[in-house]
Image (cartoon, grey):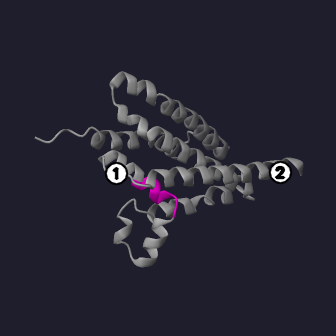
């Protein structure tokens, strides 16, 4: 008899739970739940939910101790660092934008990287040009590391590559955002 894999149930449950804030904001936007300044409302709510998700992430260790699910700890560091990197990148892109419309659309290219990585199909099955692009972009090592951790297969060098990409993106984005912020305050 096959052993029940709790990750097959837990991962989609957590994923859909993370979509609740977006669903609530969408519902509020269509049902008049936002004020006369909806951009401010959305900014404030996403900031509050960022703090909530940070607190949820910080509860991984105590939850691991209580439940005995020691494999939970594998996800916390990598996902936290990757999220940190993307937050700084979005901050820098927002500071570089000249208008609200530009700020909201600038990070859209990040969504394309998810689809052009190995999230849906292995990179080895892609056409030659796309395979090369998929292998050397930041989302593929993160996807492959998560896949290996969830399925119990070896992650090889993907874990180190994911951490290197995340640290590099976070460092460059932080420096860029701070430069833009200081330049904007000075003018």
- Residue at the disc numbered 1: 154
Mark 2 is surrounded, within 10 Å at the Cα level, by few (under 14), some (14 to 19) or many (20 or more) other residues, namely few
Q: Is residue 141 magenta?
A: yes
Task: Residue 81: name its quadrant.
Answer: top right
Q: Earlier in the sequence, mark 1 or mark 2?
A: 1
Residue 56: x %, y % from top left: 48, 31
Q: Position of residue 151 (x, y in %)?
A: 30, 48
Which residue is rendered at x = 45% and y = 28% of the image?
Answer: 61
Classify 96 as above or below 38.
Answer: below
Q: CA distance from mark 1 to mark 2?
A: 46 Å
Q: Count residues near mark 1 (Cα–Cα under 10 Å), then give few for <14, some for 14-19, many for 20+.
A: few
Q: Please, what secondary structure does the residue beneath circle 1 have? A: loop
Q: Nearer the viewer, residue 162 or 97?
A: 162
Give the magenta part as a residue range: 137-144
Residue highlighted by disc 2:
184
Among all residues in the image, which is located at the extreme top? 66
Q: Main secondary structure of the magenta part?
A: helix
Q: Determine the residue positioned at 44% across, 43% down.
A: 19
């Amino acid at each position: 008899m096959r052993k029940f894999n709790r990750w097959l149930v837990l991962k989609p449950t957590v994923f859909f739970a993370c979509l609740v804030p977006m669903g609530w904001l969408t519902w509020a936007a269509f049902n008049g739940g936002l004020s006369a300044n909806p951009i401010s409302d959305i900014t404030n709510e996403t900031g509050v939910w960022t703090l909530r998700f940070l607190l949820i992430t910080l509860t991984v260790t105590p939850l691991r101790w209580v439940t005995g699910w020691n494999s939970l700890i594998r996800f916390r560091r990598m996902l936290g660092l990757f999220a940190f990197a993307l937050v700084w990148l979005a901050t820098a892109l927002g500071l570089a934008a000249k208008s609200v419309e530009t700020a909201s659309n600038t990070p859209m290219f990040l969504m394309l990287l998810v689809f052009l990585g190995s999230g849906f199909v292995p990179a080895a099955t892609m056409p030659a040009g796309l395979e090369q692009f998929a292998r050397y972009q930041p989302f593929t090592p993160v996807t492959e590391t998560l896949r290996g951790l969830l399925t119990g297969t070896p992650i090889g060098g993907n874990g180190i590559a994911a951490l290197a990409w995340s640290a590099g993106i976070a460092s460059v984005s932080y420096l860029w955002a701070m430069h833009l912020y200081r330049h904007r305050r000075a003018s």
